[in-house]
Image (tube, grey):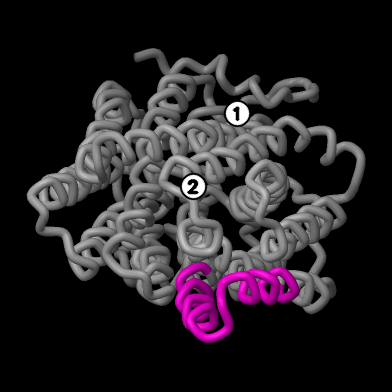
Amino acid sequence: MAQSTPVGSSAPERHIGVLYPLRHRLFRALWLATVVSNIGTWMHDVSAAWLMTTLSSAPLLVALVTTAGSFPMFLLALPAGALADILDRRRLLLITQVWMLSSAALLGLLTIAGWTTPGVLLALTAILAAGAALNMPAWQAITPELVPHEEVPAAVSLGGVSFNLARAVGPALGGLLLAALGAGPVFLLRALSFAGIIYVLVGWQRMAKEPVFPRERMLSAIRAGVRYARHAPLLQTVLLRTFVFMIGASALWALLPLFASQHLGMGALEYGMLMGAIGVGALLGAVLLPLLRRSMSLDAMLNLSMLAFALAVAVCAAVKEFVVLLGVMGVVGTGWMVIMSTFNVGAQLTVPAWVRARALSLFLVMFMAGMALGSAAWGWVAGTAGIPVTLAISGGSIVLGILLTNRYPMREIPEAHVTPSLHWPLPDALRETARSHQLTE
């Protein structure tokens, strides 16, 4: 398979369109395979959430499906980031893709056999999420290996496009197949969706880079990543604002299946269409993102998007008309796309390459901690106050979060300069290695 353009190559400054990274063959192949895999993901998520509503009507149990999908990522993201920085990322990705394929296949077979209980569903959801947790930092960290530095924001946005293009198709398709075939066959299709990524990764002739410094061990690598974050204000801003936002935003993702089935009396297909509308809105957000970046500051764009998301979630509590809800879900998707892309690019470009996967893993820790804790908490609140009231409260909590974190603005992110300065005393061997590294650049 042909190699992509070397990262870091100098080029005259130019406007980078959102589709520009697709000219790199390897990135394009992985992107297309990811679209298929993400469609399978959304089909699976719709089926798992809806299956739990048929196994139990308790809001807390339904919300725990989201927690089970988030908590393993919270636990494993830091070790996963360290592994992605000290191991061959291609091999790590292959292992995790096979792991997820096997987990989804097992869940499908158990469901077809009629052996899936709420406990089994939660357990296998957590096992599948553990594989995703080990996969995600390495997956995001390879982006700068596939495209030049100036194309990384566009490549990250394309990752969001892939995710949300699948979200526009996958939920509706999942709802249709769920109604026609049942959850088990949908889980098996999810397992099959990993095959394309595995095929591309097997064919990727990744050029292993000789480390400039001695290879780290995992525990010391984790400590180094945390220590780096303690002294990186831009990264701290991304982490803090991600966590605060996710606490409020998690209510919609945790309670939407029960909101559709119990409060609105919808079936699996209608629920899938609501999720699909979120994906269509996210695609619109991807199209608007370059225009928003040119017309307003990063912080203003983020605050505006979070406010739109919060208002859309609150409006859900008062709307029962299906067509209106589709429009509201579109606003949710647009806001979500802009917010997540802004946070993700911030986590990617505020750090040097040697710690990038660990920075992304810290981002995932805060993202999934907010999702897991928020989902469980909102599930408990919904059991007491009802789902519409809970959604209205969660929308207000997002607005409160904007006000509380406004003292930590998101700023335009320059390319990190990480050439060793040689100013501080270093061991002779390390000083010579650093000096040689400078001369070769």
Closer to the camera in the image, 301 or 50: 50
Position of 293 with respect to 116 (left or right) is: right
Closer to the camera in the image, 25 or 366: 366
Q: Which residues are magenta?
A: 371-397
| Residue 281, quarter of picture | top right
Name the disc covering residue 148, or none: 1
Which residue reaches farthest right? 295
Look at the image and tell me in which quarter the C terminus lies. top right
**Residue drawn at (56%, 68%), measured in percent from left and top?**
251
Dot 2 surroundings within 10 Å: few (below 14), some, or many (20 or more)?
A: many
**Mark before the other along the chain sequence, 2 or 1:** 1
In space, the residues marked 2 and 1 are separated at their CA atoms by 40 Å
Against 267, residue 160 (above or below) is above
Q: Where in the figure is residue 436, as x and y percent of width and height?
A: 51, 43
Against 324, residue 397 (above or below) is below
Name the disc covering residue 386, or none: none
**Residue drawn at (84%, 33%), measured in percent from left and top?**
291
Residue carrying label 2: 271
Q: Where in the figure is residue 299, as x and y percent of width and height?
A: 83, 57
Q: What secondary structure is found at the residue carrying circle 2?
A: helix
Closer to the camera in the image, 193 or 202: 193
Amino acid type, label 1:
Pro
Residue 35 highlighted magenta (yes or no) = no
Position of 150 with respect to 99 (left or right) is: right
Q: What secondary structure is found at the residue carrying circle 1?
A: loop
Amino acid type, label 2:
Tyr
